[in-house]
Image (cartoon, coloured by chain):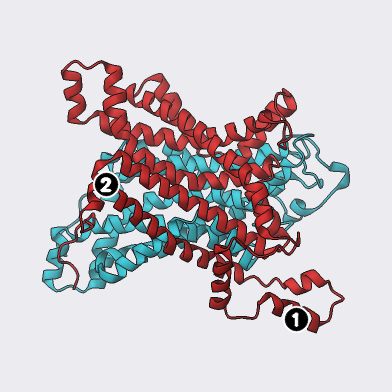
Amino acid sequence: MIKFVIKRLLTIIPMMLVIIFIVFALVSMSDVNPGRLKLGPEATEEQVYELNESYGLYDPLPVRYGRYVWNMFHGDFGESYYYNEPVMNSIAARWPNTIRLTLLSLGIAMVIGISLGVLSAVKQYSVLDRIASIASMLLSAIPTFCMAAVLVLLFSYKLNLVPASGITMGAKSWILPAVTLGISYSAQFLRFTRSTMLDTTRQDYIRTARAKGVAERTTVWRHAFRNALLPLITISGTTLGTLLGGAVAMEKVFVIPGLGTLVVDALSRNDVPLVLGAISVMAFAFMIIMLVVDLLYAAVDPRIRAKYSSSKRRRLPQKGGHSE
Amino acid sequence: MKGVKRINNPYSEAWHRLKKNKPAMLSLVVVILLILMALLANVIVDYDVAITQNASLQLARPSAAHWFGCDSMGRDLFARIVHGSRISLLLGFGTTLLTTIVAVTLGTSAAYFGGKFDNLLMRAFDILISIPSVLLALAISAGFGNGVPQLICAIAIGQLASFTRVVRSAVLNLVDQDYIEAERALGLGNARIIFTHIIPNALGTILVQATMQVARNILMGALLSFLGLGAPIPTPEWGEIASEGINYLRYTGHIVIFPTIFISITALSINLLGDGLRDALDPRLKGKV
């Protein structure tokens, strides 16, 4: 197990370097002239050139990338063009809101999606199953931000139950964003849970459990669900990636000061270092979560551990002699 | 081989099965109507109507003169939705076409030739897939500015890795089949085998995957336009219209509700059509995933 953890931890470093390089290279294509942006239209070309030079903007890409990564390891993400303060300050002020929103909605999505998914699978073709299928079909067709708008219209402006925007009202102001995002993404969990549960309940060991007289509830939860849990852990990792997109939209709809709104605002202000920093932090957070998911997977499934503790890594589909 | 007459074309069989699937056929009609709306947008309503501002009609509710009401600048919402369908559908279909071509090329060659190329490509895609697509789109927009071509690239790159994996695994199942082995024994060239035997056999999987992708891309396009990465103002686009409407929710909901209805109906019909196609092309998969 320890060997697996170390191996998995080590893979994250090169991956992260490559990801930051991709993001860095893309953002570097920008034709924003920070010197001109800062000094205004009155400044002479020389002054603009000097300021850009002092930022090191005329260095080759690999040099700039190397410097960026080096500084990043020291917690320095550069200075925002717009706020004139370290990017890290803006990020530090806002990331807790994004994390809170994401985790709350992931929790809601999992609870709703998984429980309804198990119920629909156990009672396949029942009324509940039909309703759940139709609901998940509809939910996956409505963009999250549109659903949020409709819910704001209903619950904030018509019924006056929860605030329409901002996070100044404490827990109350988190209800609508988290519930909207959670419900919207519960559809993915629902469909996935249902299909894996249907597969699992057709296995021989479930028939054995039923045959030897194990209570139905125990069969479903202890025998079937525990085995269906494995693919579910994987899907929750990938869902989080798409949920992040929804979270960015939610922050915009509900005017929550999070990393999503930070990037979107910085983008409209051509604040390149801030965009770069915030995207890198989010990509990093996402990688850490994927790492946790992988470790969780190994903790739950002894087969994965066994695979990693043996010296040779097995590749899944073996292709036989077709290469020339 | 030439003398044998094909009695059962699998695609005409699939079409027969699809015709019996009522939700899928209804969806097909809806999708065709939507595409016609996008193509004939100029015939339905003049583009000028969609961008002409009228201060006296700001936030006007739906009426006989303005079926869907007006937006915050007094522009006719019906005209904006009709013309917005062009970009929204382009983001869905155009992006999917682009992804499909690249994914089929990469996925097929990776699976067919295998070896180092396959290994390298899959490792590269492992990395690409671990960047959430919204972040990738934001980075692309930061580097190349906002606009429809950038948006198409951003969405296409974001979906490329998973699509290529699907194609690759479909082709991997085929290359080990005996008839492919037989072709090779007959001395047919790789190109011939790939184009006349591998791709036609994987077409079902590719078609289903591409259909589902269209819906996903339309939603992604709407999301990115909502975040302000889309076409420059005043070009209408469904996500952008809804985004603008959200600022005026306090006063009226119709600016958000109409684009929402159109986005959702489009995505829903395409999904139902995709489900229908999957069931028709491979009845064994029915009711799964």
Are there few (<14), some (14-19), or many (20+) residues within 10 Å of tag 2? some
State which chain disc 2 sits on. A
Q: Can residue B9 be seen?
A: no
Q: Is residue B215 above or below residue B182?
A: above
Give the residue number, with chain letter if any, for mark 2. A304
Q: Nearer the viewer, residue A219 or A47?
A: A47
Tell whether B26 sits left or right of A91.
Answer: left
> Which element is circle 2 on?
helix
Question: Could you say whether the residue bearing mark 1 is in a helix, strand or loop?
Answer: helix
Where residue A251 appears, as percent x and y from the top left, is 65, 43
Q: Amino acid at mark 1?
A: Glu
Residue A140 locus on image (x, y percent):
50, 38
**Residue at image coords 27%, 33%:** A199
Between the C-alphas of marks 1 and 2, the distance is: 56 Å
- What hue does chain B carry in this figure? cyan
Quarter holding residue A175: top right
Give the camera-side residue of A217 and B105: A217
Q: Residues within 10 Å of mark 1 (few under 14, many from 20)?
A: few
Left or right: A211, with B137 as reference point: left
Point 44% across, 46% down: residue: A238
Give, as a three-letter code, the residue at label 2.
Answer: Ile
In-front residue for pair A154/B143: B143
Q: Residue at x 42, y 39 (%)?
A: B24
Please give the letter of the chain rendered in red. A
Answer above or below: position of A36 versus A247.
Answer: below
Q: Which residue is mark 1?
A: A50
Answer with left or right where residue B122 lies relative to residue A59.
left
